[in-house]
Amino acid sequence: MTHPLQVVFGRRYRFAASHRLHSDALSDADNQRVYGKCNNPYGHGHNYVVEVRVSGPVDPATGMIVNLLDLDRFVQSEVLDAFDHKSLNEDVETFRSLVPTTENVCKEIYRRLRHFPLAKLERVRIEETSNNAFEYAGEEIQDRATVQ
Amino acid sequence: MVYLTRKIEFSASHLYHNPALSAEENRRIFGKCNNPHGHGHNYTLEVTVAGEPDPVTGMVLDLKELKTILEREITQRMDHRFLNYEVAELQGQIPTCENIAQVIWKLLEPKITQGRLHKVRLYESADIFAECYRNGASQA
């Protein structure tokens, strides 16, 4: 029988990184028009906040969906080590050919976390500043994680 | 459908310990949350009710009514309490966010009769939370 309540565990992480929004598919003038000051040639930075939500059965022995130390280690090795205090455009392979808008950063983080083995990844939310946020739940990714 | 959320805060102490496990296993799994005399948090609870606004009042439910329910069912039961020892509904459970959120859901669900309880989200700190909602419901 399906448990009537879905329980989700959420954890927030932080990283600081720089980026520049620039598309090779657009002219310089169009890049400037579309991205404005985010197109400034030397880039700029943000303090990003990433919220990771996972679901699964709550283990009666621990009261937990997942031990947060296990989740912390996975997020650290898959995302924070690669993104924190880096240039997203220069240092993260994906963004050498993809504009590192926060939409794309959100999807990339989801892609990196989707095979977390201990719980099902439900959603990634990322705040670029305290005034804008993006969420992604992996809708068009075919090999989404399944909980054991 | 409109989703209405009310937030409350309460402060409580707890510890994580499973008597079926050895002292070493408790320490390994729960770390400093296993410290024997417990520790505390400022919890933030967000309760979301879904419904259609009443055509006369324009409300899904009266926020004063929701505030009264939350004070009676949650604040009086949990605020400034040691969750392991003083909250009957948590007896026999590890008082993690996941378990407390489910207890809160079960306490509130029958009491909310205008609109329908949609989601309970409980923060233990700004960076750690658990939420619950009906299986299959949107995560809005």
Image: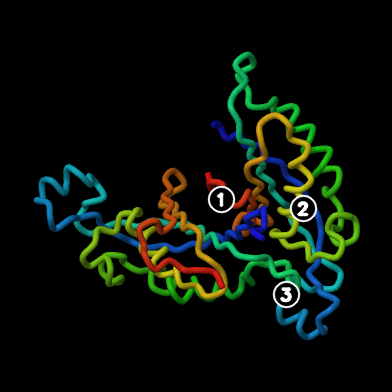
Residue identified by numbered label 3: B30
Looking at numbered disc 2 in the image, what kind of residue is underneath it?
Answer: Val
In the image, residue B96 lies at what x, y percent? 73, 62
Q: What residue type is disc 3 on?
A: Phe
Marked residue nearer the N-terminal end (1 or 2): 2
Percent position of residue B36, x then y: 85, 73
Residue denoted by label 2: B103
Q: Secondary structure at mark 3?
A: helix
Residue A119 seen in the figure: yes
Mark nearer the N terminus (1 vs 3): 3
Q: CA distance from mark 1 to mark 2?
A: 20 Å
Q: Depth-wise, is mark 1 or mark 2 nearer the camera?
A: 1
Q: Chain of mark 3?
A: B
Query: Few, some or many C-alpha atoms within 10 Å of disc 2 (few <14, some 14-19, many ≥20)?
Result: some
B96 up-or-down from B23: above or below: above
Numbered disc in front, either 1 or 3: 1
Residue placed under numbered mark 1 in the picture: B136
Residue contact at pointers 3 and 2, CB within 8 angstroms = no
Q: Earlier in the sequence, mark 3 or mark 2?
A: 3
| Residue A136 x %, y % | 42, 54
Camera-near label (3 vs 2) is 2
- Tell whether A145 sits left or right of A86: right
Tell if the residue under mark 3 belongs to the same chain as the one under mark 2.
Answer: yes
Mark 1 nearby-residue class (10 Å; few <14, some 14–19, many ≥20): few
Front residue of A15/A51: it is A51
In what element is the residue under mark 1? loop
Chain under callout 1: B
